[in-house]
Image (cartoon, rainbow, N blue to C red):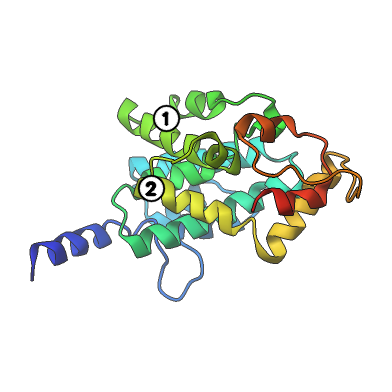
């Protein structure tokens, strides 16, 4: 066995707590969130009587995010987070990304500080929460680095995002949830939530926007978004 094959085998073995379990469509951590309540007994039944620090942090993060997004409209609710989580884990597993724990945390927390809801372009909530968990500073900063690179406005904010595998996994998962039937439904739901007009022929789409213009465009017709993200 070559060094690269041994390295890949070693990385693959570390994914077992995060990746897909047999024929199940859900990774273990996600499968736990399908019930209406997550308590210590449920998690212990899934992972055994002794939970690792990573298990505890993920459990705490799931509970925090579900609570924080409980009042969000369906375009950016817990179901969206869960889909991004699932997709991120699937992509990261296929790509043999090493820092899977950071992928999971970033996927779970990526909309906690969404400027469209908070009015602030920061990661203050995610940072504050992560500092309440048994995580080292380097890991916290890495998770925040991933979160800071996700989102359409971030693509507009720089000519070239400094891509690294963990960011790419979560960013692509978030993009995948913004296309197809789910993506269309989310766009229409968000437009309705913000009381935007669906279509206004006298207001053309704003093409070639930069980050500032995109963030300032708060009242454009909903259907314009499909042209503006090309």
In the rendered image, the vertical position of residue 143 relative to residue 172, given as above or below: above
The residue beneath circle 1 is: 133
- Mark sitting earlier along the chain (2/1): 1
Secondary structure under badge 1?
Answer: loop
In the image, 90 versus 25, the foreground residue is 90
The N terminus: image quadrant: bottom left
| Residue 3 appears anywhere in the view | yes
In the image, 178 versus 39, the foreground residue is 178
In the rendered image, the vertical position of residue 189 relative to residue 144, given as above or below: below
Q: Residue at x 43, y 40 (%)?
A: 161
The residue beneath circle 2 is: 166
Image quadrant assignment for residue 144: top left
- What crowding class fits label 1: few (fewer than 14 Cα within 10 Å), some (14-19), or many (20 or more)? some
- What crowding class fits label 2: few (fewer than 14 Cα within 10 Å), some (14-19), or many (20 or more)? many
Residue 27 lies left or right of residue 218; in this view the side is left
Q: Position of residue 58 (x, y in %)?
A: 45, 43
In the rendered image, the vertical position of residue 48 relative to residue 205, given as above or below: below
Q: Position of residue 159 (x, y in %)?
A: 48, 39
Q: Residue at x 75, y 52 (%)?
A: 187
Q: Position of residue 35 (x, y in %)?
A: 62, 57
Residue 53 lies left or right of residue 60; in this view the side is left
Q: Residue at x 27, y 56 (%)?
A: 14
| Residue 51 appears anywhere in the view | no
Secondary structure under badge 2?
Answer: helix
Q: Position of residue 91 (x, y in %)?
A: 42, 61
In the image, 162 versus 81, the foreground residue is 162
């Amino acid at each position: 066995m070559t060094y690269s094959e041994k390295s890949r085998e070693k990385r693959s073995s570390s994914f077992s707590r995060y990746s897909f379990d047999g024929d199940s469509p859900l990774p273990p951590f996600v499968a736990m969130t399908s019930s209406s309540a997550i308590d210590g007994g449920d998690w212990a039944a899934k992972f055994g009587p002794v939970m690792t620090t990573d298990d505890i942090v993920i459990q705490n993060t799931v509970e925090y995010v579900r609570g924080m997004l409980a009042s969000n409209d369906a375009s950016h609710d817990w179901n969206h987070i869960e889909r991004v989580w699932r997709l991120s884990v699937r992509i990261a597993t296929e790509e043999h990304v090493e820092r899977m724990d950071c992928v999971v945390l970033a996927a779970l927390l990526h909309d906690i500080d969404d400027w469209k809801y908070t009015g602030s372009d920061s990661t203050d909530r995610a940072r504050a929460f992560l500092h309440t968990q048994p995580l080292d500073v380097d890991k916290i900063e890495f998770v925040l680095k991933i979160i800071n690179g996700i989102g359409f406005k971030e693509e507009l904010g720089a000519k070239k995002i400094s891509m690294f595998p963990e960011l790419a996994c979560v960013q692509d998962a978030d993009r995948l949830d913004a296309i197809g039937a789910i993506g269309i439904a989310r766009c229409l739901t968000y437009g309705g939530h913000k009381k935007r007009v669906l279509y206004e022929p006298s207001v053309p789409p704003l093409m070639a926007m930069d980050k500032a213009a995109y963030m300032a465009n708060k009242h454009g017709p909903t259907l314009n978004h499909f042209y503006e993200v090309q």
